Amino acid sequence: MSERMSVIQGDITKVAVDVIVNAANSSLLGGGGVDGAIHRAAGPALLAACKRIVQQQGECAPGHAVITEAGNIPVKAIIHTVGPVWHGGDGDEAELLEQTYRNCLDLAAANGYRTIAFPAISTGAYGYPKALAARIAVDVVYKYIGIRPLPEEVVFVCFDDENARIYQQYLDLL
């Protein structure tokens, strides 16, 4: 299973996969970090698609995921998910982060996407400790792809060297 997962350091908007995951905020209207980079790269079509979703179903709660077109990013779709804000670990943050990854994988599989790229969800402005978040991400994905055919390949795209090293350490243990 571990051969179906990899880590790269770079820009998630430039990764050759079917679908990328956006670590969004609940408004889905763009923000900082990965969210801002994806919205800037995708252009106005993405913002319009996100506004339609919010009009139809309201804001996206932590742990949930929605899918949109990709605008100017050369992928088939973007899955937007809201990870938990870290409050010290006593507020169901781990369970919510697990749910976040599973819901993204479910959406990718339900739409027939073979390859998916994840950022390090919740580790930026939401303050989730990087090593704890990486362990959850790798564990959830490993278990998921171990019993399902899709997605066939999962790429963890880390913006910074520290996250890339942490994710690679967890993959090396598999």
Image: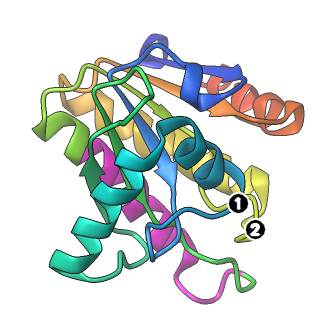
- Seen from the viewer's position, the closer of residues 11 and 93 is 11
Residue at 71% x, 53% y is 33
Q: Based on the displayed image, in which of its 4 quarters is residue 122 positioned?
A: bottom right
Q: Quadrant of the N terminus?
A: top left
| Position above or below: 110 against 27 | above
Range shown magenta: 89-106
Colouring mode (rainbow / by chain / secondary structure / one colour): rainbow
- Seen from the viewer's position, the closer of residues 9 and 171 is 9
* Image location (x, y in percent) of residue 39: 53, 48
Q: Are marks 1 and 2 in contact (CB under 8 Å)?
A: yes
What number is the disc on residue 42? Answer: none
Q: Of the residues shown, which amino acid type is indicated by label 1?
A: Gly
* Image location (x, y in percent) of residue 172: 68, 20
* Residue at image mark 1: 32
| Position above or below: 93 against 45 | below
Q: Callout 1: few (<14), some (14-19), or many (20+) C-alpha neighbours within 10 Å?
A: some
* Residue at image mark 2: 125
- Seen from the viewer's position, the closer of residues 133 and 80 is 80
